[in-house]
Amino acid sequence: MKRISRVSFLLIFTIALISCAKEAGDGGNSTIYGKLTAYDYNAEFTSLKGIYPAADEDVYLIYGSDRSYSQRVRSNYNGIYEFKYLRPGDYKVYVYSKDSSLTLPSGIYAVTTDVKIDGNKQTVEAAELKIFR
């Protein structure tokens, strides 16, 4: 039986490690969390009625360079959301808001923030997301 040389073994081992590298996504032990704040205006967006935590809103997470969202959670009664079990990488968090300019045909737009997890077992706070209601 032929023996594998040390150089061949190291080359095979290095290729195996590189091919096992994980990208942004679930399966890790890090967390992203943040807060949503609602700015409640009248229908014409001329009078602010109140500012309060944006409870029970859908919040979306995109992994790395994915084109569509990968996870969705709802904010709690304090406007706090949390995405758990993430690997290191780049993420985008977004939520939908009413269009205060009253120019978009859909009447809504996405409010986004970018978040980076640098290592394992991290808890990263995302920038506060402000939405119009």
Image (spheres, rainbow, N blue to C red):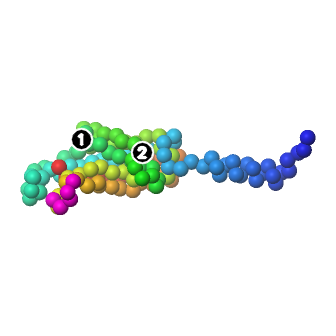
How far across and how far down the image is residue 34, in percent? 34, 47
At x 11% / y 57%, what residue is drawn? 45
Left or right: residue 60 versus residue 123 is left
| x then y, percent, for residue 36 | 27, 48
Q: Is residue 43 magenta?
A: no
Given residues 46 and 36, the one toward you in this image is 46
Q: Is residue 78 visible?
A: no
Amino acid at pointer 1: Ala
Please name the amino acid that badge 2 sits on.
Ser
For the N terminus, give its image quadrant.
top right
Sequence order check, earlier mark of 2 and 1: 1
Observer-side mark, 2 or 1, equals 2
Q: Which residue bears the numbered disc 2? A: 70
Dot 1, how many residues are within 10 Å of its Cα: few (below 14), some (14-19), or many (20+)? some
Q: Is residue 103 magenta?
A: yes
Residue drawn at x 75%, y 50% is 12
Residue 27, numbered circle: none
Q: Which residues are magenta?
A: 102-106
Q: In 3D space, how far apart are the residues under numbered discs 2 and 1 (Cα atoms)? A: 21 Å
Q: In the rendered image, which quarter is residue 103 located in? A: bottom left
The answer to whether residue 81 is visible is: yes
Q: Which residue is mark 1?
A: 55
SS of the residue under disc 2: loop
How crowded pointer 2 is (Cα within 10 Å; few <14, some 14-19, many 20+) is rated as few
**SS type, badge 1:** loop
Q: Are marks 2 and 1 in contact (CB under 8 Å)?
A: no
Q: Is residue 74 left or right of residue 121?
A: left
Q: Position of residue 108 (x, y in %)?
A: 22, 53
Residue sitting at x 22%, y 45%:
53
Does 86 sit left or right of 40 as displayed? right
Q: Main secondary structure of the magenta part?
A: loop
